[in-house]
Image: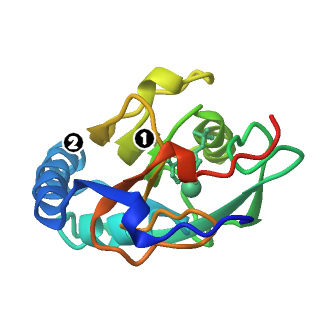
Amino acid sequence: MSREICISSLTTIFDEAKIIARIDALASEIDARYGQEPLVAVCVLKGAFMFFGDLTRRLKNPALELDFVRLSSYGMNSFTSRHVIFSKDIECDILDKHVLIVEDIVDSGHTMRFLTDQFLARRPRSVAIATLVDKSERREADIKVDFAGFKLPAGFIVGYGMDYAEHFRALSRICKVEEECLVRPEQ
Ligand code: IMP
Ligand code: MG
């Protein structure tokens, strides 16, 4: 980061109360979909960690298992993720279980396309995506978001797990970074 972003460059767009209210509703939808069937919720580290904690603690499914992946993009800049690899895979068996991928943001959709394809090859009962923020207008890959917290047309956001150069993940609210404060690499 060649230019510091300070907290005054951030504008709150969803405060903690609004986030939690939305997650309550998502948890009810997810419980209604899966009932008591075997379900593995997979947190996409690091960005989804807060969303994952708040969402999964609200789920009532007694058959719920939790697991974690960490993905890396390579060969591109940090604002796109067309080429994706695992830096940490899940550890549990998903054969004949429902898989719910829990992501912070779906943007182009390439990350979710990669992960969905990887999991489908392991013959689960189903694979679905829950994302806190859906930038659906920016989609390039063919994927379906099953549960979306908030829709956002554009803009770069941080907080509630999401970062800019590893900063701001611990904020309990979601903020927009003012465009003039972003240092974008050459496209
Ligand atoms: P996709 O493969 O283009 O859908 O990329 C999604 C990933 O890009 C997310 O998991 C985030 O890590 C990152 N990302 C996209 N937009 C933002 C943002 O506004 N703030 C922080 N990270 C973002
Ligand atoms: Mg991410």
Seen in the image, is 25 located left or right of residue 76? Answer: left
**Residue at screen point 64% across, 43% down:** 111
Seen in the image, is 58 located left or right of residue 102? Answer: left
- Type of amino acid under label 2: Arg
Foreground: 87 or 163?
A: 163
The residue indicated by pointer 1 is 128
Confirm whether residue 172 shows in the render.
yes
Q: CB at mark 2 closer than 8 A to ligand 1? A: no
In terms of image quarters, where does ligand 2 lie? bottom right
Foreground: 83 or 98?
A: 83
Seen in the image, is 127 located left or right of residue 70? Answer: left
Dividing the image into 4 quarters, which one contains the N terminus?
bottom right
Q: Position of residue 124 (x, y in %)?
A: 53, 46
**Label 2 packing within 10 angstroms: few (<14), some (14-19), many (20+):** few
- Is the residue under label 2 in contact with that under label 1 (CB below 8 Å)? yes
Mark closer to the chain start, 1 or 2: 2
Foreground: 106 or 187?
A: 187
Q: Which mark is residue 82?
A: none
Q: Position of residue 47 (x, y in %)?
A: 50, 64
Q: Position of residue 183 (x, y in %)?
A: 68, 52
Q: What secondary structure is marked by label 2? A: helix
- Type of amino acid under label 1: Ala
| Cα–Cα span, label 1 and label 2 | 11 Å
Q: Which mark is residue 33?
A: 2
Dividing the image into 4 quarters, which one contains the C terminus?
top right
**Residue at screen point 23% across, 73% down:** 57
Q: Position of residue 43 (x, y in %)?
A: 48, 64
